[in-house]
Image (cartoon, grey):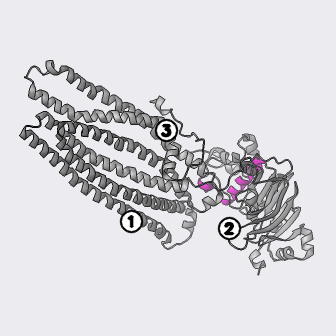
Amino acid sequence: MTYFDHLYSPTALAENRQPPMGLNAFLKYFIGQFRAAFAIRMVLVAIGSVADAMMPIFVGLVVGMLASTNPGEIFDVHGQTLLWMIAVVVVVRPLTFMLDTLIRNHAIVPNLVDLVRWQSHFHVIRQSWTFFQNDFAGRIANKIIQAGEAIEIGVNLTIDAAWYALIFVVVAVVVLAQLDIVLLVPIGLWLLAYAILFTITMPLIARYSEELSESKSVMTGRIVDSYTNIQTLKTFSTGGHEDRYVADSVNDHAVSFRKLMRVFTYMWSTLFLLNAALVVSVTWLSLSAWNSGTLSAAAVATAIPFALQIMNMSGWILEIGSSIFRQVGTVRDSMDTIAQPLTMLDAPDARDMVVPRGELVYDNVSFNYWRGKTGSVIDNFNLTIQPGEKIGLVGRSGSGKSTLVNLALRMFDVQDGAIRIDGQDVRHVTQESVRAAIGLVSQDTSLLHRSVRENLKYGRQSASDEEMIRAAEQAKVHDVIMGLVDPKGRTGYDAHVGERGVKLSGGQRQRVAIARVLLKNAPILVLDEATSALDSEVEAAIQEQLTTLMQGKTVIAIAHRLSTIASMDRLVILEAGQIVEAGTHAQLLASGGHYAQLWERQSGGFLDLETAAQ
């Protein structure tokens, strides 16, 4: 079994890493990576189907032997034929299906399911930030997870059912035609009616399954969204609003489910009538032919079991066929999310960016989150930050401060102009190298649900434990970490922090984030409200470490608490994506302009920008 387990790798990558749109192309993209295994399966299933089709023939042969042989002579007269029959039943059929089981259950199923998930995730995780902002994380994850099983089940069931049935019916038709051509009349009429039933119901099943899959993804997204934001749910009295929000999606899912079940009810009811007509007509014709002397008892014993076997198989085929088309609907639903082309791509000739100095230049930059809308968030913006210079960005919410940072990180692409780091346009180098050159501590600190060690080393995997601990000590969070114990008994730096770091307080998460950037040691540093979640005592203790961290680096600091950025080399005051003032703290206070008014209106160094704007 181990040999078959390792014939394919579940984490292999295709040469073309963009799953294509279009159902057939999407399926071929993944199935083609297992073409040899599927080809072998088709040969084995065909052999097995022929072996199964021999069973009614064997029954007829045995009945013929009994009718034409005297007692005591059957093994002498027909021994060789019986041995061939035994060989098919005992050797050929079991070995064929055993080998097929090994290939399906070990080479294909686990590897294909997880390969589809892995390659889909590999592509989706490289989508733009906007892609994830416009959807539920739970919905995206559900579509990736369900696609793997849907493709595997759909393809394997097609081989198990459709291909198997086709071979079996061909053998049955050939055998029955040789017995009596009249027997093909009910078989032919039944096949025609069965095909019509199949043609009508299967597309409906595929369509309603796609609707069901989408409603399931929405329901999953809403449920996961509730769990992700559980603190908000617990701290606000919603008066049942959240229950109704999720219940609406459950009801929509039930409506889709009922539509699908109605198709199944009509389909099975019709099939029961068709099968009854098939068995009765074949049996009646066979007995009539025997009665008139045109058909032997052996032939009757062959024809009737064939009809019974086709009847039994028809329900199985219809059940599997409906399952296949349900999987097709699921795959089509998943494909619409998974196969979306990447919108934030590296240039074909992109190289890694080299940052020996750390100069950051915004050259006539314009940007709007909603293309085609009037009024830009950033409009013809120009700013040069010299290597090692420390800039403080000041402005009320919506003035463009965080947008400028995200553009430098190439979370979005500028619509006009360019952003250059040491003369290199961020659009012409690899995204990984741009983000490796910038250390970011944001106000919305998010940690991975992994160990503290993994979170701290995320920006520099090669860092030693000694360097990691030194960074944690500088961020005043080492003692906190050493006191951590998770539900599985892991302690200290091995303790897991929970989804988005919920097991730590906001201030503790912020200090871990600061330690992470200290350890990363990037040449450009961005502090976006880096100390907003800290109390005054801890902030004062960390400010000294931040000062050390900023030495020799180009720094952009964003803060509403002006006292935290007053010592910057230069302060840049933004309003509606434009620079309205720039200078040192002393220069701006002396000029008596916008910044001076803001400084006068804050209490204890906290900036009340909304009041100042009135």
Among numbered discs 2 and 1, the one appearing first in the sequence: 1
Mark 1 highlights which residue?
A: 255
Pointer 2: residues within 10 angstroms few (<14), some, or many (20+)?
few
Residue 66 horizontal side relative to residue 311, left or right:
left
The location of residue 354, given as percent across then percent down, is 81, 46
SS at badge 1: helix
The amino acid marked with disc number 1 is Val
For residue 530, say whether it is visible. no
Mark 3 highlights which residue?
A: 34
Alpha carbon separation for disc pair 2 and 3: 42 Å
Alpha carbon separation for disc pair 2 and 1: 37 Å
Seen from the viewer's position, the closer of residues 4 and 425 is 425
Task: Name the residue rendered at 39%, 52% in the picture.
Answer: 325
* Pointers 1 and 3 in contact (C-beta within 8 Å): no
Seen from the viewer's position, the closer of residues 494 and 396 is 396
The location of residue 583, given as percent across then percent down, is 90, 67
Pointer 1: residues within 10 angstroms few (<14), some, or many (20+)?
some
The amino acid marked with disc number 2 is Arg
The location of residue 599, given as percent across then percent down, is 84, 74
SS at badge 3: helix
Mark 2 highlights which residue?
A: 371
Image quarter of residue 419: bottom right
SS at badge 2: loop
